[in-house]
Amino acid sequence: MATAQMLLKQTFAQQVEKVKNDTGIELPKYYNPAAMNPLRYANQIQKRKLLWGNKGKEAETSSAPEAPVNEPNKSSVSSNKWQGTKFAQDTDGKVASKFMRLMGIKDPNVAQGSSSSSSAGDIVKKQEEMFEAMQAQYEVARATTHTMRGVGLGFSSHAKPF
């Protein structure tokens, strides 16, 4: 004779099995099927796989026919965007190579190869001038905030009688 509890367990087991057959995702044993909806869990796992899955393979297979022929490669665009980046403290190129790796550029040698032109020197000079101007502005603002203490709203040189 089957009790209500046994029928309920059997129903939950059938529901878990149906979700496994439909989606291919099995509810882990440590989850109670009575407390956890197996279909909702399967949907959550599918969304997680889409979010954290390997986008490189999926993008090549799904968007390859739709991509225009004249569109440049994404990695070449990102390397072109950051190829002229120079750092003041970088004397041996280690800082620039680390920056390129952090930006996701696979081959930093390609990006550094075209940066030796005369326009790169002009860009470096402009950057240095801009940083010097910003440093001077910072020093003026710092001097103003530190030397002008007690000046401003609510402060005065003489006390007013009430």
Image (tube, rainbow, N blue to C red):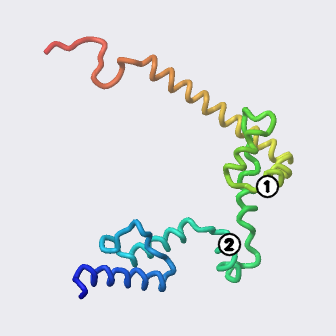
Name the residue: 42% across, 19% down: 148
Amino acid type at circle 1 is Asp
Quadrant assignment for the N terminus: bottom left
Q: Residue furthest front?
A: 1
Please tell me which residue lies in front, 21 or 29: 29
Q: Is residue 27 left or right of residue 51?
A: left
The residue carrying pointer 2 sits among few (fewer than 14), some (14 to 19) or many (20 or more) residues within 10 Å by Cα, namely few
1 relative position to 37: left or right = left
Q: Which residue is mark 1?
A: 107
- Marks 2/1: CA distance? 20 Å
The C terminus lies in which quarter of the figure?
top left
Residue 158 appears at what percent x and percent y?
A: 27, 11
Q: Which residue is mark 2?
A: 57
Looking at the image, tell me whether mark 2 or mark 1 is earlier in sequence order. 2
Residue type (three-letter) at the residue carrying disc 2: Lys
Q: Residue furthest bottom?
A: 1
The quarter of the displayed image where residue 107 is located = bottom right
At mark 1, the secondary structure is loop
Residue at left 38%, top 68%? 31
